[in-house]
Image (cartoon, rainbow, N blue to C red):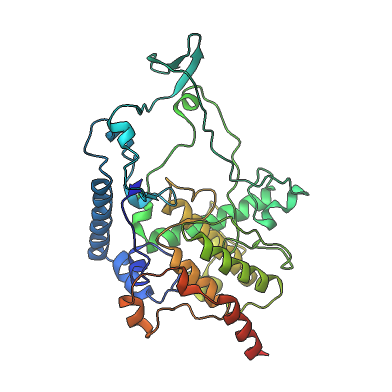
Amino acid sequence: MLARKANHNTASYMAFSVRLGDADGFGNLRNLLHGTSWGRWFVDGLWAKMASDTLEQSGILESEATKNLVPDQPLFWYGVSLAILNYPKYIDELVRIGPVEVIRKDVKSLEAGNVIRFEDETSDQTDAFVASMGWKWRPSIDFRPKEMHADLGLPSTEYTKTQKEISFKLDGRADAEVFDRFPKLATAPKMDEESLVEQEKGRIRQAFTPWRLWRGMAPPSLPTPDVVFLGVVAQLQGAVRSEISSIWAYAYMNDKLGSVKSISKSAKQLRLEQTLADENGVAVKQIGTVDDIMYDTALFQRWGKWRTPYGLGAGHPDVVLEGIACFDLLLQDLGLRSWRNGWGWAGEVFGGSYGQVDYKGLVGEWEESRHKGT
């Protein structure tokens, strides 16, 4: 989806997003907006207005030829697949004036005479066929032993029975909390990864588990902090994310993180009261205190799955409007100030949008904070 401009990186605007945790300082406002019927009505109206304005500004509705480019779902359900028109000339003019025709069909076969045959038995003739097959979000390195995949948080088809059971229970708890806090996500549209051809022919893909990383970087259950995976989180603010993540990764691997907060709404209650039940409703062993990180990891992953079903969230974190809140959480883990506009909440509400300059000097700030702490 394309927009002429987008500038919603103000901290207060994050309250309208469905972000877990209260690191941005607007948790109470977010609870009102997403935990009440009138709040959800207001938020839905805002997102509908944003989606409508985006389509109108792009000019995509002005021609029948370009209407084939209209996304399948509203703006809310997409992640970093959003884009901004930075050029004075619309790219869709190539579609509007004729050189490019958009056809949304499954290809059945390539035939003699430069013919492309579609599943509906229509055809087209072309001089060249370029297949953009996408990319794999799974790691290109084969990590062994494969029994370690779950501990490392890697996408895998090699989970043991016990690992599958633990993940299933964690996911169930996480889904319940996500839907309780953000009922809208329970209505998320489902995008089939298989094409129509695969569905009709009954082909079955081997399902990989998603990335399961604490804070989108660290394995959730390794006994020692030896490994981090950087670059797994898809985020528009990539440069800032890279710097903050690098500092966080260094601090994590050297046992220099500060006070770490849960993104759960009631971490203490979950630790003390949460029990799991088998199919017969009999209480079984509770997931305990050490596994708070595992639950936080599951909560973040399942939130991403339901937040951006038409993005990348099912496989790994995919954040847009929630990006500043993600930075806030990492900065607080490091013991650094997350409100960077000055003047407290007033600066966050009225101080304008965040940019890269607001995070200037983070390395020096962290080094100074470590020096003061020794």
Residue in front for this viewpoint, 248 or 188 = 248
Q: Does residue 287 appear anywhere in the picture?
A: no
**Please, which residue is most extreme toward the right here?**
145
**Please, which residue is most extreme toward the top here?**
112
Q: Residue at x 42, y 45 (%)?
A: 310
Residue in front for this viewpoint, 175 or 64 = 64
Q: Does residue 253 appear anywhere in the picture?
A: yes
Residue 312's x, y, as percent?
A: 49, 48
Q: Residue at x 47, y 24 (%)?
A: 197
Residue 81's x, y, as percent?
A: 43, 47
Q: Is residue 220 above or below residue 149?
A: below
The N terminus, quarter of image: top left
The C terminus, quarter of image: bottom right
Q: Is residue 20 above or below residue 372?
A: above
Number of marks drawn:
0
Residue 56's x, y, as percent?
A: 23, 47
Q: Image check: 69 left or right of 284? A: left
Q: Residue at x 37, y 52 (%)?
A: 186
Residue 326's x, y, as percent?
A: 48, 67
Q: Residue at x 49, y 81 (%)?
A: 337
